Structure formats: structure tokens, C-alpha cells
Image: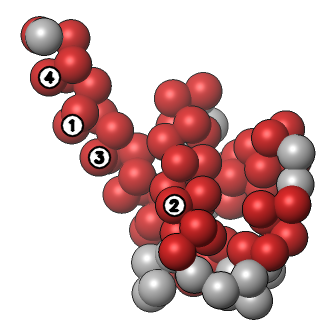
Amino acid sequence: MRGSLRIAPLGAIVVAAFLSACGSSGSSTTCSDFRGMSLSDQKSVVTNILSKHGQSTSPLAVDGALLSAKGYCFTHSGSDTVGNIEGG
């Protein structure tokens, strides 16, 4: 129980960092393309976005941002871009 209490705030920080990174310049990868990518390619897109904006590219940061991107693309049209997460 105590471990999960520490993870929740950290997850929120990771998602917030990814969302602010995407709002700065974003990615031109469409949700349709993103959904069709392999997990490795999705992680590469997310890692590039985080890296481009000076954010951590640790496995935890990448996984948190990946979940955020997948959630966004699951609920938005295929023509929306991964970079639209913050404004979506």
C-alpha cells in the first residue's frame, strides 16, 4: 500500500511533463499512425518528444508518457496528432 502511494504522484508528474512537452512544439505523428505502430516505435516517438523538450527519458517517464499518448489517441480521431494531447 505504501509503495502505491508513492507511485501515484510520480505518475502524475510524468504525465504533466509529457503534456507540457507536447504543447511546446508537438509531434506530427497522427493518432492513426501512432496506433498502427509497434510498441517499440511508439516508445521511440514518445522518447523523441520528451528528449526534444529536455524532459527525462527514463523508462518510467517514457512509460507514463506512452500511456498518456495511447489514452489520447484512443479517444480522439485518427487525424489528430500526438502533439495535440494538451489542447485535446
- Tag 4 residue: 5
Is residue 27 shown left or right of residue 18?
right
Image position, residue 83 (x, y; %): 63, 76
Q: CA distance from mark 3 to mark 4?
A: 12 Å
| Quadrant in the picture for residue 16 | bottom left
Q: CA distance from mark 1 to mark 4?
A: 7 Å
Asked if residue 24 can be seen in this view, the reply is no
Residue 12's tag is: 3
Q: Mark 1 near mark 3, Cβ–Cβ under 8 Å?
A: yes
> Could you tell me which residue is drawn at 60 percent across and 27 percent down?
59
- Crowd tier of the residue under label 4, counting other residues whose Cα lies within 10 Å: few below 14, some 14–19, many 20 or above: few
> In the figure, residue 76 lies in which quadrant?
bottom right
Task: Please provide percent x and percent y for residue 27.
Answer: 73, 74
State the residue at coordinates (73%, 74%).
31
Q: Residue at x 21, y 37 (%)?
A: 9
Task: Name which residue lies at 75% across and 43% down.
Answer: 43
**Label 2 near label 1: C-beta < 8 Å?**
no
| SS for callout 3 | helix
Count every numbered label the image shows and give the total.
4
Give the residue type at disc 2: Gly
At label 2, counting other C-alpha atoms closer than 10 Å, the crowd grade (few under 14, some 14-19, many 20 or more) is few
